Amino acid sequence: MDALTLPLPDGIDPLVALGLIGLSFLTSLLTACLGLGGGLLMVAAMASVVPPAALIPVHGVVQLGSNLGRAVLFRSHVRRGIVGWFVLGALIGVTLGAAVAVQLPRGLLLAAVGVFVLVSTWAPKVKAWPVPEKGFSFIGLVTAFITMFVGATGPFLAPFLSAERLGDRRTTLGTFAACMTLKHGLKVAAFAAVGFAYLPWLPLAAAMIVTGFLGTLAGRAIVVRVPEAAFRAGFKLLLTALAIRLLWQALSA
């Protein structure tokens, strides 16, 4: 799909649209190789070129499409009890977050995303304690509230859904994707309810979802050919550079 022929929203020129479509391919490729992190890179990069008022809603649409495919693919492995409790909490978290998120000034939003990216990239990994299924309602509430401000909360949820805890990788992939799909779906609905106009952004978001799927396929093909240590080091440096740029923009806003 050629971004030059897409109807584009105000403030997005064709070259930026092409960059976002390519970015979706890259971030999905990274997620396929590393397990997660693509959504974090996407929101950090999008924050540099997408108007702040549209950043989190549009990121949510793209991530909804990306996670939905994985959820469908691994649907037979989804732990439905976990997902059900998670969604109950997420509904509350999204509702609370929507009331605040739309009032954030541009500088504060950019700073929040920048700090979140730095913390997610460099902070010691969380060692999650065993959580009963009902406990995922609280995890859903917290991560859904946070996602209304910073978009990508996969790093917060992932430790609670590790393969060691759920038994195998397919159960982890399916349950994680199902939780993220429903959380992003609630977020998209919440922003629509408070008046965000999605229609001008849908063609671009659809193109990003398509290239994201292609990136997932490509990532699966190359995952065994790339030295993981070098891959992760480069990924962290890229995220750090993007976060510093966002903080600079926040100070200049």
Image (spheres, rainbow, N blue to C red):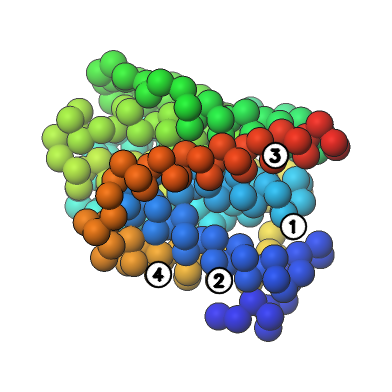
Please report contact status of discs 4 and 1: CB closer than 8 Å, yes or no: no
Element type where label 3 sits in the image: helix
Classify the position of the C terminus by image quarter.
top right
Distance from disc 4 to disc 2, alpha carbons, whole Å, reads 11 Å
Please report contact status of discs 3 and 1: CB closer than 8 Å, yes or no: no
Q: Position of residue 121 (x, y in %)?
A: 48, 32
Distance from disc 1 to disc 2, alpha carbons, whole Å, reads 18 Å
Q: Which label sits in the foreground, 4 or 1?
A: 4
Q: Which residue is mark 2?
A: 207
Mark 3 / mark 1, whichever is N-terminal = 1
Q: Is residue 72 visible?
A: no
Say which residue appears at 25% left-offset and 41% top-offset.
Answer: 172
- State the residue in front, 119 or 238: 238
As shown in the figure, which amino acid type bears the numbered disc 4?
A: Leu
Looking at the image, which residue sits at the far left?
Answer: 167
Give the number of marks. 4
Element type where label 2 sits in the image: helix
Distance from disc 3 to disc 1, alpha carbons, whole Å, reads 25 Å
Q: Residues within 10 Å of mark 2 (few under 14, many from 20)?
A: many
Which mark, residue 197? 1
Residue 23 as seen in the image, left or right of residue 175:
right
Q: Position of residue 168 (x, y in %)?
A: 15, 40
Q: Which residue is mark 4?
A: 214
